Amino acid sequence: MIKTSKYKIRIKVLIIRSFLLMSSFFIIASCANDDTQTVAEFTQLVMADEFSTDGVPDSAIWDYEIGTGENGWGNNELQYYTNRTENITAQNGILIITAKKESFEGASYTSARIVTKGEQAYGRYEARIRLPYGQGIWPAFWLLGADCGPAVVWPQCGEIDIMEYRGQEPTTIHGSVHGNGFSGADAITKSYSLLNDRFDTGFHVFGIEWAPEYINYYVDDVLYNQITPADVPGEWVFNHPFKIIINLAVGGSFVGSPNSETVFPQTMLIDYVRVYKK
Amino acid sequence: MKNIKFIYLKITLLLAFIATVTISCEREVSDDVEFASYQTTPEIFIDGFMGGLDYFPFGNSFAEAFSVDTEVKYAGTASMRFDIPVFGVGYGGATFPSKGPRDLSSYDALTFWAKASRGADINEIGFGINGDTNNKYRVTMYNLPLTTKWKKYIIAIPDASKLFQEKGMFWYAEGAENILDEGGYTFWIDELKFEKLGTIAQPQPAILSGLNVVQQTFIDTNIELDGLTQTFNLASGTNQTLSIAPSYFTFTSSDIEVARVSELGIVSVIGSGTATITATLGGVKAAGSLTIESSGSLATAPVPTLASNNVISIFSNAYTNVPIDFFNDGWDGSTTQTTDVKSNGDDIKYYSQNNYVGIGFQNPTINASAMTHLHIDIYTEDIISGNFEIQIRDRGANGEINSDFNGNPIGDDKDKRYSISSLPQGQWTSVNIPLNDGLASQKNNLSLIVFVGGVPNFYVDNIYFYK
């Protein structure tokens, strides 16, 4: 768990794009080995799902998104999202999202995608997740502008990807923002890789702390990126309420299709989702 | 695919001794080191042998293949250099065992940097060749591709918890398999050591190459499980599959009154009925299984009645047999498996998945000048498809088998080819083949009996020449 943990960090780990826009809590006077890094500062819990009730996810918190969306959810994804127990269920305090290889409603794979009913601007969003693996496997924990729709079309409504991952790169995750002028392949992204570990063999905490002037990205106890309005070549659209989405996609433009070595079923295990404010 | 077979199990101790004496780049641990258990030294070769290491070239390998190179190296002051001879001169092959056992249980991979003077595939490379344990934990990676640039390579440990007293640190075997295959080149290995990478994950062990095989058989048959592999997903996202020794697995029989499995992966059929053999590796269920359908005891073949002075016996409990070199020499392209079966005390040979296989006897050859026939008792439950051919070869006086590309005798060789178009199923049939045709005038240097095609699975007994 993160909260305001202090830890040792080497200077090379800490790459901050803009010292000028650093908020006051983020003190980097000098970076000797003894320096500590404050990963997250928002501590007032406003929403949490610990998935402590077995069965379907809490309907007070989550909605399902069913089907194949438009053009495979805009990415040529191959799966059909369902609300069936074999694709999504909570067991022993863990939400299990399972991608299966099966013919279903014209698709070759099934999986699940959930979105929060509630929405919030700013805050600290984190989830503790064990990821699946294999070519063509694409899990994500992300935020989408609550106003996304016909009136405010993507990417004007904004997207903050807290964690995206390619199953064929089991040691690396990506944190991104999308808006007008910086979406899709042109999103502002930074990748974070584990050394001597991988994301599919244990749980890791993926989080952001989002304030009006910045979005900080962290994995476990490592703050690995900060994105500010100065970093995006377009309008800073991260100033209104967003919803949380958790999904496990199969195939699509970001990962390519599964191959003969991809093992099915694949499971994404979510221990908790927590949202804090300052 | 390459199919070369190296005789790496036969380590020539004399060569090994010479090599050991000539290699003197060891670094000994200091006197004040005390080991609570076995040493955990991960390094094998950094700039010289580490932690007490030997060098044993394999039998018949090119003795000068290995040297220490101080000119070409990835890091430090020296690398391991391997000079692979051109086709026809032999091969490079050796094991590098630790002098004392090492505890490798805290590591998950053997790693090294390597490059070659040209693009090349190392035929076999790995660890776990250990004469003390009959290579109990051998690991083989086939056809490791090298480039002309230094690159780091990883060979995963199938289950490190087994390797708490391992001597087999590293081995390789590489040679030109034909005139077109790479030979006459050099490759280098540096920074050879065991590591804990933390990124070796998602094991997918398999037996019988992951297939679910059903095999009809009889009591007293022993079947060796093959196709034993471990597959891991590496940090690169790619899968690596290694051929591994049976002792990494835990085998289970669903009915131990029908079949039992040894730690060495040998299935012994002891009763009638059905039993399924499965396996786990490090707690992970292996893909693949062998279902034994045992029909009880195999009927015994007819007992020979001829007087022994009218017989030259190759394989029979009724006579004294002449020396036999092999019942299956693993010829290139042969799929045939040979199994020893005992039925009511009688020895029987079982040939399965046969396409072609030979019984060889050349030390000495058989002079059957006084004989008129070859006798074989054959049992099969298969229906013959096409022709089942039995060939008897006389290799002539020149001391070697001379064949054309189709396997027909040339030079001073002669043979007899006898086709069988049908055999009754489920009973023994006595086949008596006259020594005529090519053998009519020459049968004093018989050296081979070959079974070709027609019937994949059959039992043979009482193979003898008679008059």
Image: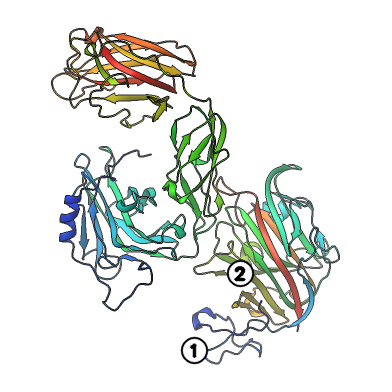
For label 1, the crowd category at 10 Å Cα-Cα, with few meaning under 14, some 14 to 19 and many 20 or more, is few
**Quarter of the image where one finds residue B31:** bottom left
Query: How far across and how far down the image is residue A209, in percent?
Result: 69, 78
Mark 2, other Cα within 10 Å: few <14 / some 14–19 / many ≥20: some
Position above or below: B424 against B327: above
Q: Vertical placement of B150 versus B384: above or below? A: below
**Is the residue at mark 1 from the same chain as the one at mark 2?**
yes
- Residue B407 is at least partly visible in this image: no
Measured along the vertical axis of the image, is residue A112 above or below residue A223? above
Q: Say which quadrant the C terminus of chain B sits in.
A: top left
Q: Chain for mark 2?
A: A
- Measured as percent of width and height from the top left, residue A240 is found at 79, 75
Q: At which x and y percent is residue B246? A: 44, 46
Left or right for B239, reference A175: left
Residue shown at the point (74%, 75%) measured from the top left:
A238
Q: Could you tell me which secondary element the residue under label 1 belongs to?
A: loop
- Alpha-carbon span between mark 1 and mark 2: 27 Å
Quick check: B64 left or right of B148?
left
Task: Name the residue rendered at 30%, 69% in the picture.
Answer: B75
* Residue at the left extreme of this rendering: B397
Q: Write down the residue under mark 2.
A: A189
Residue nearest the viewer, comparing B199 with B281: B281
Residue A32's disc is 1
Lower position in the chain sequence, tag 1 or tag 2: 1
Instruction: Locate residue A179: give its quadrant.
Output: bottom right
Residue type at mark 2: give it: Thr
* Mark 1 chain: A
> Where is residue B461 shown, x and y percent of the image?
36, 20
The number of numbered discs placed on residues in the rendered structure image is 2
Q: Are the residues at dot 1 and dot 2 in contact (C-beta closer than 8 Å)?
A: no
